[in-house]
Image (cartoon, coloured by chain):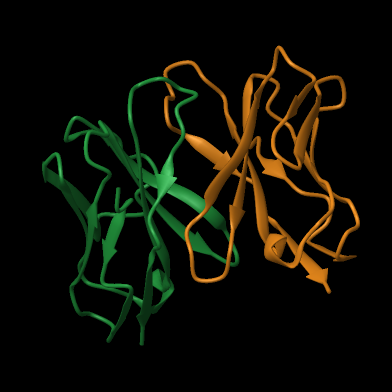
Amino acid sequence: GESVGLHLPTLSVQEGDNSIINCAYSNSASDYFIWYKQESGKGPQFIIDIRSNMDKRQGQRVTVLLNKTVKHLSLQIAATQPGDSAVYFCAENAGGTSYGKLTFGQGTILTVHP
Amino acid sequence: DAGVIQSPRHEVTEMGQEVTLRCKPISGHDYLFWYRQTMMRGLELLIYFNNNVPIDDSGMPEDRFSAKMPNASFSTLKIQPSEPRDSAVYFCASSLTGQRTDTQYFGPGTRLTVL
């Protein structure tokens, strides 16, 4: 079946560096994507989203890029801080009548070293 | 706002026992979701409700699982009888409206261990 997946399960960076977390999706019908951050012992927390009619969206220190041609999504974190250490998930919503049915990727563990 | 509240935070039980997980969504949110998270399968949607009515339960693994939402501020996920393979973290989430792009807010989760 179609699914959302991640290329890299772990990413280690130094404090102050920029981080890039990647996600591949296979459902061509997906038109809405979300990045979530999950800290240890907590539930996923919304970071940023993007619709398929956009290529890029920026938030505070985060940028999401969408390449529909190759079905690829990335999350860029600028000036990574130790507090950014967490598991990051991309999720997709294929729309139609399936409201609320988010399909999550497996997650990438980001570790930020001081 | 207190956010989504789940109880208990941790549950340890023996195989065959009944387990009930509880959730209080954010006040005013019309949609409530139950997810399960495991290392092998990641985050999976089990069921979701709109205005207390179950809309899609296709993610519920089997008849041992049931979910109810008797009112707008309370939902339960019940497993009877529980099995070791049910061990996971169960999350409840809620969103404000029926818009597909509406943010889902997650609770802290219940870590279930079935021995």
Query: Is residue A106 in view?
Result: no
Q: In the image as oriented, which residue stretches furthest toward the top?
A: A53
Chain that appears orange? A
Q: Is residue B61 left or right of residue A66?
A: left
Task: Find residue A61 and report its horizontal and vertical position in percent.
Answer: 76, 42
Task: Find residue B20 and report its horizontal and vertical position in percent.
Answer: 19, 67
Q: Is residue B65 left or right of residue A69?
A: left
**Foreground pick, B94 / A94:** B94
Give the residue drawn at x 58%, y 64%.
A39
Task: Find residue A107 and report its horizontal and vertical position in percent.
Answer: 68, 55
Query: Is residue A62 in view?
Result: yes
| Total numbered circles | 0
- The quadrant in which residue A32 appears is top right
Give the residue drawn at x 63%, y 20%.
A31
Look at the picture and state if A7 lies above or below B104: below
Q: Is residue B105 left or right of residue B1?
A: right
Look at the picture and state if B6 lies above or below B29: below
**Foreground pick, B108 / B70:** B108
Q: The C terminus of chain A appears in which quarter of the rendering?
A: bottom right
Q: In the image as oriented, which residue stretches furthest toward the left?
A: B70
Give the residue drawn at x 22%, y 40%.
B27
Look at the picture and state if B115 lies above or below A78: below
Q: Is residue B52 left or right of residue A33?
A: left
Q: The N terminus of chain A appears in which quarter of the rendering?
A: top right
Shade of chain B as shown in the rendered figure = green
**Foreground pick, B70 / B59:** B70
